[in-house]
Image: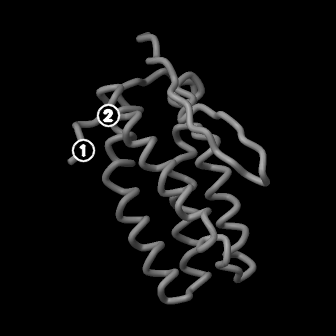
Amino acid sequence: MIAPAPCRFISLTHAGLARTMPHIDVERALKALDGNLELLKDLARMFVEDAPVLMENLKTALLDNDPLNARSVVHNLKGLVSTFFAKASVEIAQRLEDSAAIGDLTPFFTGELDRLEDSISLLTSDFTERGWVDQIG
């Protein structure tokens, strides 16, 4: 098995507490895929294709003031980032999903959506740096 590249870290602030968390947990992701690195790379490529589309769908749901659709889309995004055991991204998505589930879209407009988008961007950069996806842009 190929040794994973060193983790990069993302610093997030939630409830006033700064935390540093790895973008992805390659070891756990590989374990979940029976050590299949090529499958993990394929999933990273799919993530890079699908995440921007889902983010656009989420923004449309927010513009439409549609918490049900926002919840559905953010749930799908959470599933994508969960594949890579990206704990920080999963936590952000979970908070947004929980909020949308009760019809409250406020967190989307008070920084959480930006944090989710930033975490997805960092994941994409991480995949690019590892050579799992082609250079973006």
Towards the viewer: 42 or 85: 85
Number of numbered labels in the structure image? 2
Q: Amino acid at mark 2?
A: Thr
Query: Which numbered disc covers residue 108?
Result: none
Q: Amino acid at mark 1?
A: Ile
Which residue has dot 1 on it? Answer: 136
- Residue furthest to the bottom in view is 64
Q: Position of residue 112 (x, y in %)?
A: 61, 62
Colouring chosen for the image of the structure: one colour
Q: Position of residue 123 (x, y in %)?
A: 45, 41
Specify whether 135 is left or right of 54. left
Query: Which of the 4 image quarters holds residue 109?
Result: bottom right
**Disc 2 versus disc 1: distance between alpha carbons?**
8 Å
Do labels 2 and 1 touch, CB within 8 Å? yes
Is 103 situated above or below 28? below
Towards the viewer: 104 or 114: 114
- Quadrant in which the N terminus is drawn: top left
Q: Position of residue 83 (x, y in %)?
A: 53, 42
Give the structural element (helix, strand or loop) at label 2: helix
Is 1 situated above or below 47? above
Which residue has dot 2 on it? Answer: 128
